Amino acid sequence: MSAGYAFAWLYVALLGSGVWIAVAGLPRRADIAACLGYGVVLGFVACGLLVAGRAAPGAQLAAAAWPWFAATLAVVAVAAAWRVRRAPADGILAVPSERLPWWGWALLALLAWRFLLIVDEAWLRPVFAWDTWIAWAAKAKVWFESGQAAHYVAPPLWIDGADANARTSLAWHYPELLSRIDLWLASASGAWNEAAIGLAWPALWLAMLTGCYGQWRALGLARPQAVLAVYALGSLPLINVHAALAGYADLWIAAILVFAVLAWQRWLVRGERAQLVLCVALLATLPLIKFEGMVWAVALAALIAFGAVPPRWRLGGVAIALVLAAVAVLLSWWLKLAWLTTALGILGGGGGGRSATSLFGVLRAFASGLFAQYNWHLLWLVVPALVALRWRLLREDRALALLALFVAGAVVFVVGLFALTPAAKWAESNTAINRLVLQIVPVAVSLCALWLRDLSLSTDTDRATSAPPDPA
Amino acid sequence: MRARLAVALVVWWIVCLVWFARIPVTAPLVPAQREAFAGASFRSAIGDAGIDGQALSVTAMDDKDGVLLVRRVDVVAAERPVLRYRVGDFPSTMELALVFRRADAPGDTFSTTLTTPRGEVGTIDLATEREWRGRIVEVGFAAYAVAQSAPPATAFRPYRFLDATFESPSWRGALGATATEWFGRRYWALMSMSALGPDAPRVRSRSLILFAAAGVLGSIALAAWLGGWRERRLLRFAIVASVCAWVALDLRWLLTLTDRHAGTRAAYAGHDWRQRQALQPDRGVAAAAARVREALGDKLGQVRLLVDAPSDYERARLVYHLLPANAAPINLLVYARKNYPGVYLVTYERDASNYDAEKGLLTLLDETTEPAERLIDEPPLQLYRLRQAGAP
């Protein structure tokens, strides 16, 4: 593997971590894990944005874009240094560091073995999965060979032949950030090397686990609990598959969404404004990855607005949330944004879908995906069990209640989308419904972990773990 | 009280296993009737194989990337619905299938996929197969690279077909069939990205996940009823039971992941990244794309190509293999235009007789005709240049 490629990875880590430090200050203790995890994601997103619009074909792109990359890193480094000097970190972690029991190390060993398999799989296997060679990698490959002057248009415009640089495909209107990340990795490796591109997905998986661990610790989970939750998330089979068979966008959505949600939770619980900044920045990238990202971003933004309003003004909060969501949709309609056109197409049956042959069939497919297939182990049986046993806690913990509301709303949205619209076709064929669920699964695992944070895993007499401190 | 609870838990898990494994409770523990056929009694109808003691050693696929071992039998399907098959060293990158003929339809061939066993022994309950009825007069075992996933060039490894036994229903047969489905070896499929379980060719068994869930939920209920524990202790028991079940399911998943990865290593390890990218599961489509690139030469970067093939998969793959050519699948246009001047049309496994060479007219799928010049006619691949009407 070339020095340029190795340097590209170092650049991702430095840039992304630098952004975290510039916003949230120098990380301490478990926040180091959060910084590293968020750093990988932020670094990749930044690199994808930095290469956009550069004319050079892929083999020369990295060299042509180098001044921009260097300048960006310099700006981030200066901002980080200034932030560190001004205030080292927001508050300290109050949860004492328990020693990890033997079973914690055993679970981590299972994750480590899995990671080795995932990395080797992504390294050895060329582009394999359907959407990868139809959408994400296809555009990147065209740009790598021909330069980014090649742009994608609707099929009737393409066949007119008026624009020599116009291309078309089944995915001509898909967001392009992920394809640009592919392009940048290929450029860094010096060739259209699918193994070099594919390694981003195992890294994303590891970054998601690391970032979640750090945030869960900051939100009051003791180390054994946090490791158990990391294992629960990392062991989920369909998430393993998306990390190993590199190329799909769903894992990116899942990672960015859970990072945004956990940053929001930290702001709610600990009052850390820097975390809110990170949350908003991550929300803004969701629609750039995949269309569903816009739905999650609008939903979460509305909930953040609702949550920011004091409880005595609850109705006003609901009104603000609805207005925000409506403004987002109207703006998208006015600007003719592709996500809305696509969504309306799916709802109207124009995207090749068809309504459910029977509602029971769709619900059965949905239930099968959650409970009977091998996708999620026992996760979706644990969630309702928690609801049944611990729903009273939601009355006492507003942040947790809002998180539960988000997860519940997401589940209702997914069920409604497939049960009541022409998207049912993709539920009955098992081709889309589980991947949409995958996008919210890390948030669901976070909900379970935080819901159980008061329960000690120590074999001593029960004791409450320390709650997160009041904001410094 | 603890002893009562322990016994109740054991009984509950056995009841769950009987239901989920579809064990016929009135059947004997071991099959009363068996009819075994040694591997050496089969002959190779497709591919190369040689007798190796009591087994048949399969050493090569044919040029269409398949293997088929057959023999005549006389089996009453209803009396022998359980097939126990033994295969040694069967590669993860290949799929095994049972092929059979019936006396009432000698001209027809029926088939069903078989799960690759962990170890050598696999079992399938053919009573669930609609076509397994009447008198079976011929059986065969086919093998081929996993479609759309394993590159045929590196998928095959020599293996040994040991024997096949047709049995009457029994507890052993039901447990064996369930164990084969739950713990058998799988390889990656396109569906694996969307659903695990349905990514197998057939879903035959009840869900292992639901079995574990039923076992855990029943255990918790029994503990609450018979254990007399307080809420907090019961909650801790529930968490421990759930975690143990989760870890058990995860160990099974890790085993599956290791199998799939072993198949990937077998297919791709030892090659550099360029060679790996050349190892495609659809090498016919990839070869067709290479031929088109060769034919168009320097013009490739300047022309537009429409691609037509029988399936979405082949169309989309042909477009990808042609990249960075400016290509699109023909179905995107829904034949919106009736005139495609200057556009090239690539057809793969389409009927070539729709081209009239004398008149230079190509009939498209919507039965309109376009003036065209045929540049390649090498079935299954054709390449046409669509011309303006009246143009030379």
Image (cartoon, coloured by chain):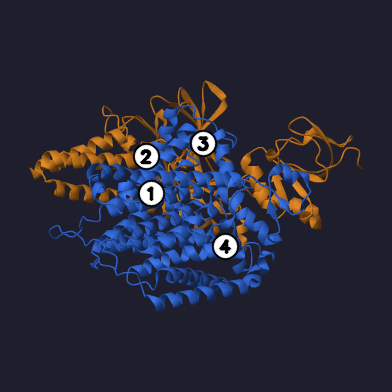
Q: Which residue is mark 2?
A: A372
Which residue is tagged 3?
A423
Q: Secondary structure at mark 3?
A: loop
Between the residue at mark 2 and the residue at mark 3, the CA separation in whole angstroms equals 21 Å
- Tell me the element at label 2: helix
Indicate the position of residue A371 as horizontal and vertical percent values. Answer: 36, 40
Circle 1 chain: A
A28 relative position to A295: left or right = left
Q: Which one is nearer the viewer's eye here, A416 or A312?
A: A312
Mark 2 vs 4, N-terminal side:
4
Task: Give the labeled residue for mark 4.
Answer: A48
Label 2 to label 1, Cα distance in Å? Answer: 36 Å
Distance, label 3 to label 4, CA atoms, is 30 Å
Side (left or right) of A86 relative to B324: left
| Disc on the earlier residue, 3 or 4 | 4
Which mark is in front, 2 or 4? 4
**Amino acid type of the residue tagged 3 in the rendering:** Ala
Pointers 1 and 4 within a single chain: yes
Q: Colour in which chain A is shown?
A: blue
Quadrant where the N terminus of chain A sits is bottom right
Is residue A373 shown to the viewer in this render? no
On the image, the x and y values in percent for residue A79 come to 48, 74
The residue at which mark 1 appears reads as A306
Q: Which residue is pictured at 32% across the width and 36% down the height? A: B21
Camera-side mark, 2 or 1: 1
Q: Amino acid at mark 2?
A: Ala
Separation of residues labelled 1 and 4 (CA atoms): 32 Å
Q: Indicate which disc, 2 or 3, sits on the residue closer to the N terminus.
A: 2
Mark 3, residues whose alpha carbon is within 10 Å: few (<14), some, or many (≥20)? many
The reply to whether dot 2 and dot 3 touch (C-beta < 8 Å) is no
